[in-house]
Amino acid sequence: MIKVLFFARLREELGIDGLQWPWQAGMTLAELLSQLQGQGEPWASCLAQPNLLTAVNQAIVDSQELLADGDEVAFFPPVTGG
Amino acid sequence: MLQHFQPYDGQSDEYPTGAIVSFSGLVRDFNERPEVTALTLEHYPGMTEKVLHQLLLEAQTRWQLQDALVVHRVGRMLPGDIIVFVAVASSHRKDAFAACEYIMDMLKTRAPFWKKEETDNDSYWVDARESDAEAAAAWLKAHDGHRQ
């Protein structure tokens, strides 16, 4: 399974802070994103935001990142701390 | 998050630190809208600590530092409250100023914090600023990291 987390505006728009998603061998971050978007609205539009950031195991990565079973994947908007 | 690069053991009679620079970031009563009444900071527990620690280590590779500290609050705050505090100790003031600015510029674009502002009748997520992204990018372009 993949542990999926959502933060800030994205968490509010989706109405959920996280979920477990089935892992498949050879799965990339882009494929996970596509499967999540396939759940219809609001997933499709919320996860299509162009400036969305993604982290795997708490490090920012790009969409070609290969996922392993048990990975923690987070989706979030650009950061605004400090 | 505190990183001792040259820990003082209490036994040495050497005093290499010649400069300590600190930065405090406060909640303003204006930002995207004119009358901000409160601010709530959300973060990504776990990743936040990793990124802040990484920023301190990066600063040490660019400048000669004895200590570096970053403290960042989360949760609900009011105007005038301190959100973030960065302090850097170095032998030279230029290194201390530069490292402090570097840590803040990088924190602004890489540390997973998100601000939600409140006014009397509304609340909204603060948008990321292009100027913050440009400030971070400028550091990455500077090969040696020193602004001589």
Image (spheres, rainbow, N blue to C red):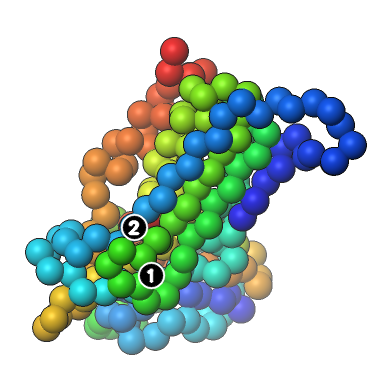
Q: Label 2's element?
A: strand
In the picture as drawn, the residue positioned furthest to the top comes out as B148
Image quadrant assignment for residue B116? bottom left
Vertical order, B104 against B71 (above or below)? above
In the image, residue A65 lies at what x, y percent? 53, 54
**Where residue A17 appears, x then y in whole percent?**
43, 82
Q: Which residue is painted at 43% across and 36% down in the image?
A: B101
Q: What residue sits right under mark 1 in the picture? A: B41
> CA–CA distance between discs 2 and 1?
13 Å
User: Is residue A44 shown to the viewer in this render?
Assistant: no
Q: Residue sitting at 31 percent across and 81 percent down? A: A12
**What's the chain of the residue with tag 1?**
B
Rendered image quadrant of residue B124: bottom left
Given the current orientation, which residue lies at the most extreme right position?
B11
**Looking at the image, which is closer to me, A75 or A23?**
A75
User: Is B50 drawn above or below residue A7 in the view shown?
Assistant: above
Q: Quadrant of the N terminus of chain A?
A: bottom right
Disc nearer the start of the sequence (2/1) = 2
Residue A57: horizontal and vertical position, in percent? Answer: 60, 62
Q: Amino acid at mark 1?
A: Leu
Residue situated in front as seen by the camera: B20 or A40? B20
Q: Residues within 10 Å of mark 2 (few under 14, many from 20)?
A: some
Quadrant in the picture for residue A81: bottom left
Viewer-side residue, B4 vs A76: B4
- Is B75 above or below relative to B15? below
Q: Which residue is mark 2?
A: B26
| Left or right of A65 in this view: B126 | left
Work out whether residue A39 can be spotted: yes
Q: Residues within 10 Å of mark 1 (few under 14, many from 20)?
A: many
SS assignment at label 1: strand
**In the rendered structure, the residue with mark 2 lies on which chain?**
B
